[in-house]
Amino acid sequence: MDSRQPNSLAAQPLKIVGIILIISSLVDYLILLFPPNFLQRQWQMALTTQLVERGIIPMVGLALLLAGFGLEGNLSSNYPNRKTPIDLKFWAFLLSSFLGLVFLLLFPLHLNNVRLDRTEKLEQINARASQLEAQLQTQLNTPDIKKQIESEQSRLKSQLSQLMENEQRLNEALNSPAVPEPLKEVLRKSKENPKAIDEFVEQRFNTQTLENQQLTQIRGQKEQLMEQTKITALKSGLQTGISSLLLAAGYIAIGWSGLKNMGYLKVGRRKAPVR
């Protein structure tokens, strides 16, 4: 019985599975390209991310395919003529080198797209915040808003005045932890200075106070959105970029080492001339 038969039987499934993984991945890559929209940055970023996420599958296919050839003993000594166009190992190494080049080029492309996308989104956030601030200024200057503020001031003054007239409720308010300390101080002062309540309400509830509150809210939301945008861009750049570099290094190492072993790449020191 031929001693190489078990190796051949084990090698055949490895090569078949490897070829299927490679072909299915290439078909998947082609499908991702349609419908093409090469000039749109978002499309480029989505394509790059999906290519990198699926990038390990062809490498596994190549590893299985080459492992199959290794079991047959063809990787070291049984290479066919290098001029033979049907040498599957040659095309596998060539494909690996090509994929390595693709993932190497995707690295700077994706980082640049992430940078441009982050800049654009930050500008949009700033523009939106400026628009909201301008709208706020316009709204606060309308007669309706001023009437609402005056109405709220009158209501609060009336409530506090009624509270001052009821000694029991006043003491309960002064002893309650739920009542803010500044309001308690005003209630104490109002016993000697009846205008203290009016001054407090007018200082706390006016157009400027309302404007400051709304501006603080708008600017807080702006800072939060900007921080989220920066973090998302950083994660995308690091995750996809580093993965793309690792895939490029792996594919290039497989492809170039294989082509070198097959004799397609001549790498070495030049021999010194004989004197």
Image: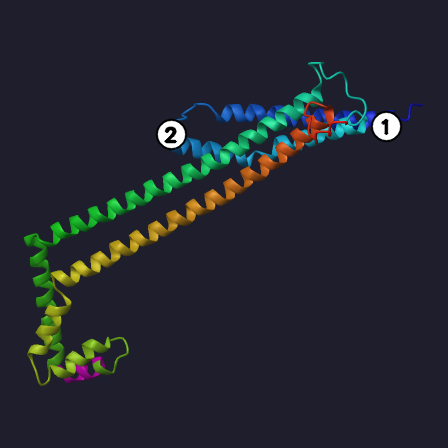
Q: Mark 1 points at which residue?
A: 6
Q: Image quadrant of residue 101?
A: top right
- Residue 25 image offset from top left, x and y in percent: 59, 27
Identify the amino acid type marked 1. Answer: Pro
- Residue at 51 percent of width and 24 percent of height: 31
- The residue closer to the viewer here, 7 or 206, is 7
- Residue 98 image offset from top left, x and y in percent: 58, 26
Q: Is residue 252 left or right of residue 238?
A: right
- Residue 11 image offset from top left, x and y in percent: 78, 27
Q: Which of marks 2 and 1 is nearer the N terminus?
A: 1
The color scheme shown is rainbow
Is residue 51 in view from this perspective? no
Is label 2 in a helix, a strand or a loop?
loop
- Residue at 77 percent of width and 21 percent of height: 79
Q: Image quadrant of residue 185?
A: bottom left
- The residue closer to the viewer here, 146 or 69, is 69
Highlighted range, magenta: 166-173
Does the magenta portion include 141? no
Q: Mark 2 points at which residue?
A: 40
Quadrant (top left/top right/bottom left/bottom right) for the C terminus: top right
- Residue at 26 percent of width and 80 percent of height: 176
- Residue 205 image offset from top left, x and y in percent: 14, 65
Q: In this view, does 122 lie to the left or right of 249?
A: left
